[in-house]
Image (cartoon, grey):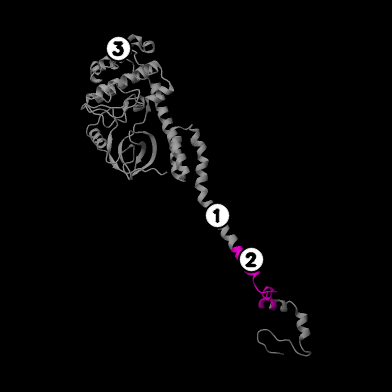
């Protein structure tokens, strides 16, 4: 099925799922830049207001919003494409304790910037925090109905939602604080906190990162009023940790390249199934530039070449069938001709004249005795 993207965008590759639809990395043709296209419901007022607010007051912790684009069946938000790795992917690949601590500090700073601007996220989880190769964390896929005005939150992800979600007077930023506490615990201890775990009883957290216990305990208090009102006032409680090392940042860059290359190969396979070999070849070339060891891309290249030759092969088959049909028609016409017409073909006059010239003895026998031969050219006799 062909992608229903807005006009003016090409080379789209799905990179995730938003609250209402897919998110694509695409090329904005008129400006020659890569953007992230996020699908939203057509006419969704809250989504449009959120996009307008983000565009009017950009923050370093969020992707820059470029504009709203109308599609045929839905609307799209065009925003900055963030090239990095989600915290979920980093955890799946394994983290050293010092790497986890550096990521936790960066995450706390990013959410504090958001809260200091009077905004909230509404769906903080490892999938929605992108760690970049420069060491920054960018927050993506904000819950569009989340605000700092006291409006009840909608959406969110089970396991990261604050206990008071859905109740009257829920403070969105205090709910974010709970979600941050869950993510920090998961990063540092390798699992989300179990119900009832508190303080020094957190054996895994005490073993892996004892310096973080006071802050995580503060963020995960069930009573909202006992929690910080936002992450901004508790930045001073974040333990001092060294920044991410160069080797770790290089590994993040490689993981980001490999992840995007893998998505490109998957999209190239879909394009081949839709008989679009030229578009598939472009994606495979880009995938190999990002990840030269991408075996799936190398294995798919023969399919691209075969797909490109398919039209010419079809034309050859049609041409061969046409020749066979013509031959059958000629044979049928010969079989239906009268028997007399299928006899010996008449000998052309040029052939007869040539034969006569090659048989002079027969010519002399046919002339009457005493008659001189005629001289060629003038026709007079001696």
Judge whether residue 328 is colored magenta: yes
In the image, 348 versus 181, the foreground residue is 181
Residue 316: mark: 1
Residue 269 vs 340, above or below: the answer is above
Give SS at disc 2: helix
Residue 331: mark: 2
Q: Quadrant of residue 132?
A: top left
The main secondary structure of the magenta stretch is helix
Give the Cα separation between the discs numbered 2 and 3. Answer: 97 Å
Judge whether residue 36 is colored magenta: no
Q: Which residues are magenta?
A: 326-352
Q: Residue furthest front?
A: 167
Residue in the picture at 65% in, 69% down: 335
Earlier sequence position, callout 2 versus callout 3 = 3
Residue 237 visible here? yes
Earlier sequence position, callout 1 versus callout 3 = 3
x and y, in percent, of residue 248 in the image: 40, 21
Q: Quadrant of residue 179?
A: top left
x and y, in percent, of residue 185 in the image: 35, 17
Earlier sequence position, callout 2 versus callout 1 = 1
Give the Cα separation between the discs numbered 2 and 1. Answer: 23 Å
Give the residue number, with chain letter if any, for mark 3. Answer: 214
Give SS at disc 3: helix
């Amino acid at each position: 099925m062909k992608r229903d993207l807005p006009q003016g965008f090409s080379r789209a590759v799905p990179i995730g799922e938003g609250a209402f639809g897919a998110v694509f990395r695409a090329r904005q043709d008129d400006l020659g830049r890569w953007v992230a296209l996020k699908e939203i419901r057509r006419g969704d007022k809250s989504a449009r207001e959120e996009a307008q607010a983000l565009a009017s007051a950009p923050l370093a912790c969020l992707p820059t919003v470029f504009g709203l684009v109308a599609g045929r069946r839905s609307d799209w938000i065009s925003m900055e494409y963030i090239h990095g790795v989600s915290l979920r992917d980093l955890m799946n690949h394994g983290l050293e304790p010092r790497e986890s601590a550096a990521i936790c500090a960066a995450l706390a700073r990013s959410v504090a910037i958001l809260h200091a601007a009077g905004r909230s996220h509404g769906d903080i989880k490892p999938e929605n925090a992108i760690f970049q190769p420069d060491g920054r964390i960018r927050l993506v896929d904000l819950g569009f109905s989340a605000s700092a005005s006291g409006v009840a939150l909608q959406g969110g992800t089970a396991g990261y939602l604050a206990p008071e979600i859905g109740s009257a007077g829920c403070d969105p930023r205090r709910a974010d604080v709970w979600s941050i506490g869950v993510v920090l615990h998961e990063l540092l201890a390798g699992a989300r906190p179990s119900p009832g775990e508190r303080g020094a009883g957190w054996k895994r957290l005490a073993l892996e990162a004892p310096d973080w216990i006071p802050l995580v305990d503060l963020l995960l208090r069930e009573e909202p009023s006992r929690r910080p009102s936002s992450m901004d006032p508790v930045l001073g409680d974040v333990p001092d940790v060294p920044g991410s090392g160069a080797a770790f940042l290089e590994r993040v860059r490689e993981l980001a390249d490999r992840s995007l290359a893998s998505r490109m190969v998957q999209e190239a396979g879909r394009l081949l199934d839709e008989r679009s070999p030229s578009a598939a070849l472009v994606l495979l070339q880009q995938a190999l530039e990002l990840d030269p060891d991408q075996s799936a891309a190398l294995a798919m290249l023969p399919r691209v070449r075969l797909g490109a030759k398919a039209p010419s092969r079809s034309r050859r088959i049609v041409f061969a069938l046409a020749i066979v049909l013509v031959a059958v028609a000629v044979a049928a016409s010969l079989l239906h001709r009268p028997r007399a017409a299928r006899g010996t073909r008449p000998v052309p006059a040029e052939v007869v004249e040539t034969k006569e010239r090659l048989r002079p003895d027969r010519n002399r026998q046919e002339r009457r005795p005493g008659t001189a031969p005629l001289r060629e050219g003038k026709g007079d006799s001696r």
